[in-house]
Amino acid sequence: MKIRVSDIGDDGLHIETRRDPRWLDNIPELWSGNEEMKLVSDIDVDIELTKVLREVSVLGNLSFTIEAPCALCLEPVRLDISPDIRLILSPSDKIDDDEDLDHQTYRGEDADLGDYLRELIAVSLPVKVLCREDCKGLCPECGQNLNRETCECGKKWKDPRLAGLEKFKL
Ligand SMILES: [Zn+2]
Ligand SMILES: [Zn+2]
Protein backbone atom coordinates (compact mmCIF):
# COMPACT_ATOMS: atom_id res chain seq x y z
CA MET A 1 0.00 0.00 0.00
CA LYS A 2 1.80 3.06 -1.30
CA ILE A 3 1.44 6.65 -0.18
CA ARG A 4 2.99 9.76 -1.67
CA VAL A 5 4.47 11.94 0.99
CA SER A 6 3.94 15.04 -1.17
CA ASP A 7 0.16 14.36 -1.15
CA ILE A 8 0.03 15.10 2.57
CA GLY A 9 -1.00 18.72 3.00
CA ASP A 10 -0.86 21.01 6.00
CA ASP A 11 -4.16 19.61 7.26
CA GLY A 12 -2.90 16.08 6.97
CA LEU A 13 -4.41 13.35 4.88
CA HIS A 14 -7.12 10.90 5.79
CA ILE A 15 -7.10 7.59 3.96
CA GLU A 16 -9.83 5.02 4.20
CA THR A 17 -9.38 2.03 2.03
CA ARG A 18 -10.39 -1.59 1.80
CA ARG A 19 -8.10 -4.39 0.79
CA ASP A 20 -8.86 -7.73 -0.65
CA PRO A 21 -7.87 -10.74 1.50
CA ARG A 22 -5.53 -11.85 -1.28
CA TRP A 23 -3.36 -8.97 -0.21
CA LEU A 24 -2.35 -11.18 2.69
CA ASP A 25 -1.17 -14.17 0.74
CA ASN A 26 2.31 -13.76 2.10
CA ILE A 27 1.23 -13.99 5.72
CA PRO A 28 1.69 -17.72 6.23
CA GLU A 29 -0.73 -17.79 9.19
CA LEU A 30 -3.55 -16.42 7.10
CA TRP A 31 -3.04 -17.40 3.52
CA SER A 32 -6.17 -18.68 1.89
CA GLY A 33 -5.12 -22.36 1.97
CA ASN A 34 -4.73 -22.43 5.74
CA GLU A 35 -7.36 -24.60 7.39
CA GLU A 36 -6.69 -23.46 10.92
CA MET A 37 -7.15 -19.72 10.75
CA LYS A 38 -8.56 -17.80 7.86
CA LEU A 39 -9.52 -14.30 6.98
CA VAL A 40 -13.25 -14.01 6.30
CA SER A 41 -13.52 -10.29 5.54
CA ASP A 42 -11.81 -7.56 3.62
CA ILE A 43 -9.24 -5.56 5.50
CA ASP A 44 -10.32 -2.03 6.30
CA VAL A 45 -7.56 0.51 6.67
CA ASP A 46 -8.34 3.86 8.28
CA ILE A 47 -5.37 6.15 8.76
CA GLU A 48 -4.60 9.77 9.40
CA LEU A 49 -1.29 11.01 8.02
CA THR A 50 0.37 14.14 9.28
CA LYS A 51 3.65 15.55 8.19
CA VAL A 52 6.09 17.64 10.16
CA LEU A 53 8.96 18.67 7.94
CA ARG A 54 9.79 15.38 6.26
CA GLU A 55 8.62 13.13 9.05
CA VAL A 56 5.23 11.50 8.65
CA SER A 57 3.14 10.07 11.45
CA VAL A 58 0.61 7.43 10.57
CA LEU A 59 -2.12 6.85 13.16
CA GLY A 60 -5.27 4.84 12.79
CA ASN A 61 -6.37 1.27 12.75
CA LEU A 62 -6.95 -1.82 10.71
CA SER A 63 -9.97 -4.02 11.04
CA PHE A 64 -10.72 -7.47 9.77
CA THR A 65 -12.43 -10.70 10.79
CA ILE A 66 -10.88 -14.10 11.12
CA GLU A 67 -12.37 -17.51 11.58
CA ALA A 68 -10.57 -20.21 13.52
CA PRO A 69 -11.58 -23.39 15.34
CA CYS A 70 -12.10 -23.12 19.10
CA ALA A 71 -9.01 -24.60 20.76
CA LEU A 72 -11.18 -26.80 22.97
CA CYS A 73 -14.32 -27.82 21.07
CA LEU A 74 -13.17 -27.15 17.47
CA GLU A 75 -16.33 -25.20 16.59
CA PRO A 76 -15.55 -22.38 14.15
CA VAL A 77 -15.30 -19.01 15.88
CA ARG A 78 -15.38 -15.60 14.24
CA LEU A 79 -13.29 -12.89 15.74
CA ASP A 80 -13.08 -9.19 14.85
CA ILE A 81 -9.59 -7.84 15.20
CA SER A 82 -8.62 -4.18 14.98
CA PRO A 83 -5.01 -3.40 15.82
CA ASP A 84 -3.91 0.22 16.16
CA ILE A 85 -1.54 1.67 13.65
CA ARG A 86 1.13 3.88 15.18
CA LEU A 87 3.95 4.41 12.76
CA ILE A 88 6.50 7.08 12.06
CA LEU A 89 7.91 7.34 8.57
CA SER A 90 11.22 9.11 8.34
CA PRO A 91 13.30 9.94 5.31
CA SER A 92 15.96 7.26 5.07
CA ASP A 93 18.72 9.62 6.15
CA LYS A 94 17.12 10.50 9.46
CA ILE A 95 15.78 8.30 12.26
CA ASP A 96 14.68 9.40 15.71
CA ASP A 97 14.13 6.94 18.45
CA ASP A 98 10.75 6.89 20.09
CA GLU A 99 10.07 3.63 21.80
CA ASP A 100 6.29 3.90 21.70
CA LEU A 101 6.08 4.12 17.96
CA ASP A 102 7.19 1.89 15.17
CA HIS A 103 9.60 3.30 12.70
CA GLN A 104 10.05 2.87 9.03
CA THR A 105 12.03 4.83 6.51
CA TYR A 106 11.15 5.97 3.04
CA ARG A 107 13.12 7.19 0.07
CA GLY A 108 12.17 9.99 -2.24
CA GLU A 109 8.44 10.73 -2.10
CA ASP A 110 7.00 7.26 -1.90
CA ALA A 111 6.43 5.24 1.23
CA ASP A 112 5.08 1.72 1.15
CA LEU A 113 3.03 0.68 4.17
CA GLY A 114 2.38 -2.82 2.88
CA ASP A 115 5.06 -4.68 4.83
CA TYR A 116 4.30 -2.82 8.02
CA LEU A 117 0.56 -3.51 7.77
CA ARG A 118 1.07 -7.16 6.93
CA GLU A 119 3.36 -7.55 9.90
CA LEU A 120 0.87 -5.75 12.12
CA ILE A 121 -1.82 -8.20 11.05
CA ALA A 122 0.45 -11.18 11.66
CA VAL A 123 1.34 -10.08 15.20
CA SER A 124 -2.26 -9.23 16.09
CA LEU A 125 -3.50 -12.75 15.43
CA PRO A 126 -4.49 -14.64 18.56
CA VAL A 127 -2.41 -17.65 19.54
CA LYS A 128 -5.49 -19.46 20.75
CA VAL A 129 -9.16 -18.89 20.02
CA LEU A 130 -11.96 -19.96 22.36
CA CYS A 131 -15.65 -19.94 21.46
CA ARG A 132 -16.38 -18.69 24.97
CA GLU A 133 -14.41 -18.36 28.15
CA ASP A 134 -15.96 -21.37 29.84
CA CYS A 135 -15.98 -23.67 26.83
CA LYS A 136 -16.36 -27.23 28.11
CA GLY A 137 -14.57 -28.73 25.12
CA LEU A 138 -14.98 -32.21 23.74
CA CYS A 139 -15.34 -35.37 25.78
CA PRO A 140 -11.96 -37.13 25.56
CA GLU A 141 -13.76 -40.50 25.39
CA CYS A 142 -16.58 -40.11 22.86
CA GLY A 143 -15.83 -36.75 21.26
CA GLN A 144 -19.21 -35.21 22.19
CA ASN A 145 -19.25 -31.41 22.25
CA LEU A 146 -19.99 -30.88 25.94
CA ASN A 147 -21.28 -27.35 25.38
CA ARG A 148 -24.26 -28.82 23.56
CA GLU A 149 -24.90 -32.16 25.20
CA THR A 150 -23.63 -34.19 28.06
CA CYS A 151 -22.51 -37.76 27.66
CA GLU A 152 -22.29 -40.73 29.98
CA CYS A 153 -18.50 -41.07 29.83
CA GLY A 154 -17.83 -38.73 32.74
CA LYS A 155 -20.04 -40.82 35.01
CA LYS A 156 -18.22 -44.06 34.30
CA TRP A 157 -14.82 -42.50 34.64
CA LYS A 158 -13.41 -42.52 38.14
CA ASP A 159 -10.69 -40.18 39.15
CA PRO A 160 -7.81 -42.48 40.10
CA ARG A 161 -6.86 -40.12 42.91
CA LEU A 162 -10.31 -40.47 44.43
CA ALA A 163 -10.23 -44.24 43.97
CA GLY A 164 -7.05 -44.25 46.07
CA LEU A 165 -8.76 -42.26 48.76
CA GLU A 166 -11.64 -44.73 48.96
CA LYS A 167 -9.34 -47.24 50.65
CA PHE A 168 -9.00 -44.87 53.55
CA LYS A 169 -12.71 -44.60 54.17
CA LEU A 170 -13.50 -44.31 57.85
ZN1 LIG B 1 -15.28 -24.10 22.33
ZN1 LIG C 1 -18.25 -38.86 26.31
Image: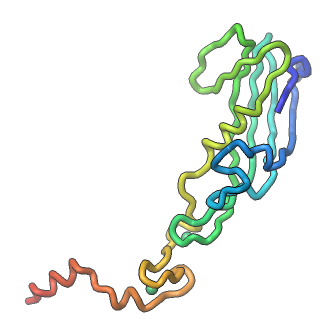
Measured along the vertical axis of the image, is residue 128 above or below residue 3?
Answer: below
How is this picture coloured? rainbow
Location of residue 124 in the rendering, given as x and y in whole percent from the top left corner: 62, 45
- Residue at x 70%, y 47% (from the top left corner): 82
- Residue at x 68%, y 63% (from the top left corner): 78
Quadrant of the rendered image containing residue 15: top right
Measured along the vertical axis of the image, is residue 26 above or below residue 77?
Answer: above
From the viewer's perspective, tell me whether residue 5 is left or right of residue 151. right
Viewer-proximal residue among 35 and 117: 35
Q: Residue furthest top?
A: 93
Q: Ligand 2 sits in which quadrant? A: bottom left
Q: Residue furthest front?
A: 33
Q: Quadrant of the N terminus?
A: top right
- Residue at x 74%, y 31% (from the top left corner): 59
Viewer-proximal residue among 28 and 106: 28
From the viewer's perspective, tell me whether residue 132 is left or right of residue 167. right
Quadrant of the rendered image containing residue 87: top right
Location of residue 129 in the rendering, given as x and y in whole percent from the top left corner: 57, 60
Location of residue 169 in the rendering, given as x and y in whole percent from the top left corner: 11, 88
Measured along the vertical axis of the image, is residue 94 above or below residue 1?
Answer: above
Q: Quadrant of the C terminus?
A: bottom left
Q: Give the total of numbered labels.
A: 0
From the viewer's perspective, tell me whether residue 8 is left or right of residue 133. right
- Residue at x 81%, y 27% (from the top left corner): 49
